[in-house]
Amino acid sequence: CAVVILDTLDYVIAIGGYSFQGQFRVVMLTDSGIVQDAHEQLDPYLDPSGTQSVTAAILADDTLGGTVAGLVVQTTRNVRRIPDTDLVAADISVQFLKQVLP
């Protein structure tokens, strides 16, 4: 399962239009009765390449279908077990830029 969360949105006004940059997080979640199995299930999604890679999928369309001017996958971090559950999660941080012309 994946959840996308907008973390920041910073506006910059320029002559002849404006732009904004922001950052969102893709939170990957796996569930297993055994925590080690959940970590192993998460690994292919966190790999920077491969058919299940979230990073590779994002970079394959680095304008998100023309929604943004460009993006950078910054980090994969915060791999953790969610307390009192069998869930293991990890955060993939993505920074983007959007330009709006008049």
Image (tube, grey):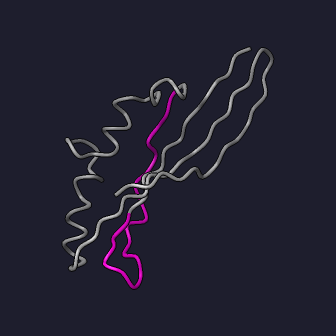
Residue 34 painted magenta: no
* Left or right position of 102 against 86: right
Task: Give x and y (percent) for residue 5.
Answer: 53, 53
Q: Nearer the viewer, residue 90 or 1?
A: 1
Q: Nearer the viewer, residue 88 or 75?
A: 88
Q: Residue at x 73, y 36 (%)?
A: 11
Name the quarter where the N terminus is drawn.
bottom left
Name the quarter where the C terminus is drawn.
top right
Report the residue that reaches farthest toward the bottom: 84
Is the residue 59 above or below the residue 28 in the image?
above
Task: Give x and y (percent) for residue 54.
Answer: 33, 46
Q: Residue at x 35, y 63 (%)?
A: 29
How many discs mark residues in the rendered view?
Answer: 0
- The prevailing secondary structure element of the residues shown in magenta is strand
Q: Tell me which segment is drawn in magenta.
A: 70-89
* Left or right position of 28 against 4: left
Is the residue 46 above or below the residue 68 in the image?
below
Task: Give x and y (percent) for residue 58.
Answer: 38, 37
